[in-house]
Image (cartoon, rainbow, N blue to C red):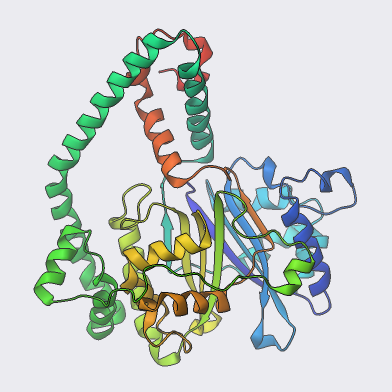
Amino acid sequence: MPSGGVIVLARVRPGKEEELFLFLNRLGNDINGRELATSHRAPRIEFRNSHTIHFARLALMDDPDSGAGRKRLLVTTDFDGPLEAHVRELLALTTDSLAIWGCCEDYGGGADFAAFLDRNRIEPATYYLAFRGDNLPRIRDARELREVFCALLAAPGNEALRAELSGRLRLLGWIRRAWRRVAAPVLFIMHMFAGLKEIPRLRRQFGWAHLLLAGRQITATLGRIPWIRLINSILGNGAQPPTARFSQASPWTPARLMTREHPPEDTILQNQLTLVTDVRAEELPRQKAVLAIINHYARRLATPGNLVGISTIHTVRWALIDGGRRLLMVSNYDGSWENYIDEFAEMILSGLNALWSSAPDFPQAGAADVPAFKQFLRTHQVPANVFYSAYPQTSVLNLKQDLEFQTWNGWLLRGLPTPATRLPAASVA
């Protein structure tokens, strides 16, 4: 997974909104550049040529502080390597920088690109990555290894290979389950002390009142973590269960987007979600404490491919924008929008309340009223004109399996009756 990410929010020049909107929709409907590349005059961003970008999105969103009809360009990326190299690559992938970035107010040309991004860059308060430290080449190698090896297993005459590998996989599964049982108490103690060590820093930053309130809200439905379950039982901390386990939100079909053939939702395995909600001024200190605690959980308690029981999130970020008056969320996830929200409501309902109860129009019953909560999200959802994924047909669970197979392939494949020359060179240990 990527080592870093960028969030850029830049004001669009007055009168350039329509031009930029049409360009972004053309790019979004032809994300691999097959049609735009045939026209030498059509500006585009060649995401498909990147060796470091995992996910990217571009979206036009309202700019209420600048007046009616004004827009801002939201750009988010998740990438490998240092920021400076990513900025250079992003500019190189843009075929006509003035036609695209020049629609923004303070863009001064290619030589100003790095400074332009820096002036408009927003630091996330919370950033979760499903797999930290696994770069794009390794992910692609792991996928290729799995595909080639599955083809070899399915080929006629490889019965001995299938039988031997099946036995090794069963043994590996037993070893891993045994290790988890032995390691669980050790990890429990490590996580508990890691959490305790963070308390003084968080207390100095946010104060006891906001810290305790935020922590109590977030942890109310985190019973899957042993030490949090213990604390919840001691303190009697709990949350109201959902009033409806499943529901269907109203269809999200903004007329302006549908008439321009905007890329629809739920058309591929992966999806993206962009939300912008208001934050009441009196709730801002608590909101900051909530984001800090969630960021700590995401870095300290999340296992690879799993955020407190949710295994569908590739990356997710929250950031306070506009001087803390609004909260931005950008997420890349697997499955449909409906299933994604249902999973959140079932697994971490109290975390949803902690995150969005600062909004003036948050449902009175909170996320426990799942239909009302979904309608709240629909109201604040920002359509992404462009969504790019380097591996759009691969889920978090698939990636986890592929990376684990790649890690163990030296042992799993050693001595098997399969010619090594038929496997990807990078997979042969």
Q: Position of residue 130 (x, y in %)?
A: 41, 50
Q: Position of residue 118 (x, y in %)?
A: 61, 65
Q: Position of residue 365 (x, y in %)?
A: 36, 84
* Residue in view at x 33 percent, y 71 percent: 349
- Image quarter for residue 176? top left
* Residue in view at x 53 percent, y 49 percent: 82
**Is residue 157 positioned above or below 364 on the image?**
above
- Image quarter for residue 284? bottom left
Q: From the viewer's perspective, tell me whether residue 253 is left or right of residue 55.
A: right
Q: The C terminus appears in which quarter of the rendering?
A: top left
**Is residue 90 positioned above or below 355 on the image?**
above
Residue sticking out furthest to the bottom: 282
- How many numbered badges does the structure rendering display? 0
Q: Position of residue 125 (x, y in %)?
A: 43, 69
Can the viewer see residue 426?
Answer: no
Q: From the viewer's perspective, tell me whether residue 258 is left or right of residue 412.
A: right
* Residue in view at x 33 percent, y 67 percent: 348
Q: Nearer the viewer, residue 60 or 11?
A: 60
Can the viewer see residue 424?
Answer: yes
* Residue in view at x 76 percent, y 57 percent: 110
**Is residue 188 positioned above or below 75 on the image?**
above
Q: Nearer the viewer, residue 119 or 218?
A: 218
